[in-house]
Amino acid sequence: MNNWKQDIEPFLNDISKPQRYLGGELNEIVKDWTAVSCRFLFAFPDVYEVGMSHLGLQILYEAVNQTPELLMERTFAPWTDMEALLRRESIPLFGLESGREAADYDCIGFTLQHEMSYTNILNMLSLGNIPLWAAERGDEDILVIAGGPCASNPEPLAPFLDAVILGEGEVLLPRLLQTIGNHKACRGGKMDRKTLLAELAGLGGVYVPSFYEPVYDAAGELTAIMPLEMPGMERKAPAMIKKARLKDLDSACFPTAPLVPYIEVVHDRMMLEILRGCTRGCRFCQAGMIYRPVRERSCETLLRQADALKKHTGHNEISLTSLSSSDHTCIKELVHNLMENFEGEQISVSLPSLRANHFSVELANEIQKVRKTGFTFAPEAGTQRLRDVINKGVTEEALLQTIEHAVQAGWSQVKLYFMVGLPTETMEDVDGIAALCERVVRRGTQVMKEKGRFGALKVTASVSNFVPKAHTPFQWSGQDTQEVFKAKHAYLRQRIRDRRISYHYHDPFTSMLEAVFARGDRRLAVVIAKATEKGCRFDSWTEQFKGEAWKTAFEESGLDMQALASKTFHLTAILPWSHLDYGIDPDFLKREQALAFKETITPDCRYHGCSRCGICGPEGGLVLFGKAEDL
């Protein structure tokens, strides 16, 4: 087997950032291929700098490689100059650790972090000389699997995938790979693909798309997702596939000696996952639904892991990651102890996910005594009415008080995240974004003057476009049209005239594509294939995005992307992801949608009683993690 890293060495001076393709980082794990039963290639469908910033990669790298009989190596989407080189010199996509070509592994797995990475997945399969369509792969071909948040609706990619992991990969991926290894060992190193897929489907948490057939009526509406007979099992595939769920985060696998890149990556720091899940219940937020329930790591465990991270990396910052870091029960104690332990070592602590309250300011002030960067909050909507619709538990006065406390503590820059196009939004709500930014500027600038500080508070308003997501209360809602989005952004550009406010917004066309694939079905696979053939790559990178190629791909496929994005589903409709169970009761989602339209909030179940979302079973009763007055 060839080491293809050697073949690119003569060309390293001709490509940008050649370190992306060399491996050899600190804490890299290289195993003997002959001593393992299953060889897995983790494929991140974006550039190295993005992929190496992903904590999930590091967790899976540890979870798989700590098992002696398993091997996990990495590959990333090559940038355009490297792709051109690979194709010109007939060099296949390869793993960074061994330099082996992708087709030599037993299994390649893609993480589905966002919908705009889908063409990169197909392009990487092409570069790896792996048949794109699952139906075209034989017993000698590598298995292609996927997981991650977009696996909550993998149907647009289903015809390309042999299997999909639902839920938390560190629980299921090692079991899946061991099953592959055992299957091949029993057959002298050979694979019976159909029998193996049936074995994987029996693991629980593994979805095998080829064992399910979507049924459509004459109008093209999805009417059923039919389980098929599984080879050698004498039974059909399960009607529902339940996600894999990690029960105890405290004892879960965590990489205390993570890979340390030799080049700067997006998040160049230690990452400490302090809790997983969120029960705040924002109705647009997919992560807040599919990662339930909330599970914490204890302060003792976190301090021990932080000390190990410090010893095994050269980073000068540690980030406390979660969906809502200030919700951790012992966050005050944890931050205090980390600051004390790192004192004198020039290691800073960051909290990237904070709520708009005084408590968050106190935390941020504690950890940013040396250097104060910008302060970030996400009101999401400009009016209280719309914040109640989306169940965003923050009032305008609470936000303004938080800004006041932040400015008093020394901050002079604030970033606010909003969305346009949320269900029930009116132009009054859109105007509220500008009005709220103006009130924040005025309140903050006034406090600065009272403190005798020169200048004014600087506010950056970053406005994205609502994208309906599977497994959320808004999964049935259509998206605004391009014309409506453009009109709203044009209004805000004209409305926001205060030079102290910077306005940035997301491209509506890209958001439309996200909506199409977030709620789409298998008929979209041909569109993705056509777009890839037309040169679509790195679709989330503005300079690489090819909008006209996407339009042509949809037209040639006979599909109307605007109609698909704007489609409103009936509450009784069969959805493309209806057979995928992430633990949230569909009736709960319907109740939440009804409450949204009534502009009624649902309190956080950790402090105000069970909301019967279904994640804790029919009896409910999630344990109390902290006191409301501590937050």
Image (cartoon, rainbow, N blue to C red):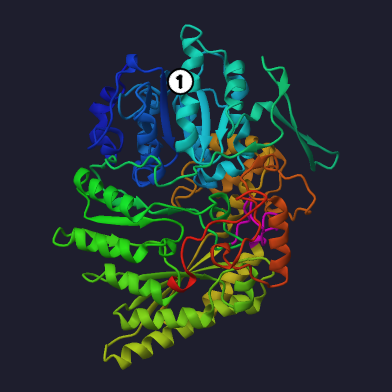
- Residue 440, placed above or below residue 487: below
Residue situated furthest left in the rendering:
344
Report the residue marked by disc 1. 106
Name the residue at 59% across, 32% down. 204
Q: Is residue 117 left or right of residue 470?
A: left
Q: Is residue 265 visible?
A: yes
Please state which of residues 610 and 25 is positioned toward the viewer in this rendering: 610
- Residue 384, placed above or below residue 519: below
Please state which of residues 219 and 614 is positioned toward the viewer in this rendering: 614
User: Is 478 within the magenta?
Assistant: yes
Which quadrant is home to the N terminus?
top left
Q: Is residue 183 left or right of residue 33?
A: right
Quarter location, residue 256: top left
Magenta segment: 466-482
- Residue 518, placed above or below residue 68: below
Name the residue at 58% across, 75% down. 491
- Residue 503 lies, in percent from the top left, at 46, 72
User: Is 386 within the magenta?
Assistant: no
Quarter location, residue 581: top right
Name the residue at 28% across, 53% down. 303
- Residue 240 lies, in percent from the top left, at 69, 36
- Residue 515 lies, in percent from the top left, at 62, 52
Which quadrant is home to the C terminus?
bottom left
- How packed is label 1: few (under 14 Cα within 10 Å), some, or many (20 or more)? many
Q: Is residue 359 left or right of residue 576?
A: left
Residue situated furthest right in the rendering:
218
Please state which of residues 69 and 287 is positioned toward the viewer in this rendering: 69
- Residue 351 lies, in percent from the top left, at 35, 62
Q: Is residue 268 visible?
A: no
